[in-house]
Amino acid sequence: MNAALAELLPMVNAGLWHGITVFIRVAVLVSFVPAFGEQSIPTRIKLMLALAFTMVTTPAVTPTLIIPSLDAIWWFALTETVAGLILGLGLRMFILGLQTAGSIAAQSTSLSQILGGAVADPLPAMGYALIIGGLALAVMSGVHVNAARLVVLSYDLLPMGSLPDGSIVSKWGLNQTRHAFSLAFTLAAPFVILSVLYNLALGAINKAMPQLMVAFVGAPVITAAGVILLFLAAPAMLTVWMGSLDHYLANPFAPRR
């Protein structure tokens, strides 16, 4: 019995160290995943989610030989934290893009101050509605499954125990930031176009009828038009956003258009 336990103990230790290294990367990534990593989610729930993701992904990750030592622990903690941060920040850029799109749309339609403090990050009403809709759509579309797949895929792109090249990461980060703001402006483009047409029409009316207080007439019109346009355009906006998010989850280092 003791001999069997002695043979089993090295296997248990190896499996435990393997699970700990996977957990470090997963825990960092989960804190950025849309819906699961929001500030409104309690820390204990995030910890349980990280443990659940670790249990799902660990069997699919090829074990790496780890000699338990203080230096090895610190090194793997550093490399896996960096890998999780890189992947997680790329995911968080999509939430930033949706928030920016909502802010641009609200500013274009004079709705930028309504419900501004409804979430941890101050957002206008349109941004809040888009964020809630985007998070709900992401969960319904299986973002947790795609995130688990991303963890397994990440070990081919960011091997365990090695730091990524700084120049490659900087170019990738710049590309992700550019894509986030490009996506935000693309999503908010209908509201910007509406604002331009509204201001042109308002200027023409004011030129033709200087005595008319066009601001009192135009303000309710642009507000109503913005709400109606949000109702009509939100499904298409969230579909485009979700497609871009799925593309990232499938291949996080692919070039963004």
Image: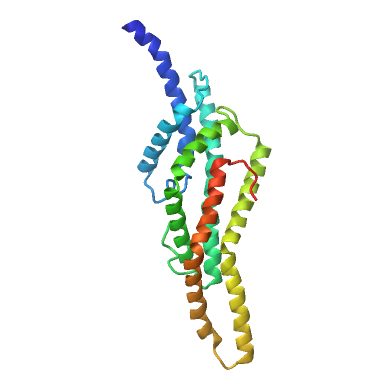
Instruction: Name the spot of residue 153 as percent of width and height, x first.
Output: 54, 34
Q: Is residue 19 visible?
A: yes
The outermost residue toward the bottom is 211
Residue in view at x 50 percent, y 75 percent = 225
Q: Residue at x 54, y 66 (%)?
A: 105
Q: State the quadrant of the N terminus.
A: top left
Locate residue 110 relative to residue 253 in the image: left or right: left
Q: Residue furthest left?
A: 1
Percent of width and height locating residue 165:
65, 34
Marks counted in the figure total 0
Measured as percent of width and height from the top left, residue 151 is found at: 50, 35
In front of the other: 44 or 71: 44
Q: Is residue 38 visible?
A: no
Q: Residue 88, position in %: x, y?
A: 52, 43
**Residue 185 falls left or right of residue 133:** right
Q: Quadrant of residue 133?
A: bottom left
Q: How is the image coloured?
A: rainbow
Q: Which residue shows up at 49% across the image and 34% down it?
A: 25
**Relative height, residue 190 to residue 80 (above, below):** below
**Residue located 39% across and 51% down the image:** 40
Q: Which of the pair 11/249 is nearer the observer?
A: 249
Relative to 179, say whether 48 is above or below. Answer: above
Between 232 and 48, the one lying in front of the other is 232
| 190 shown above or below 5 | below
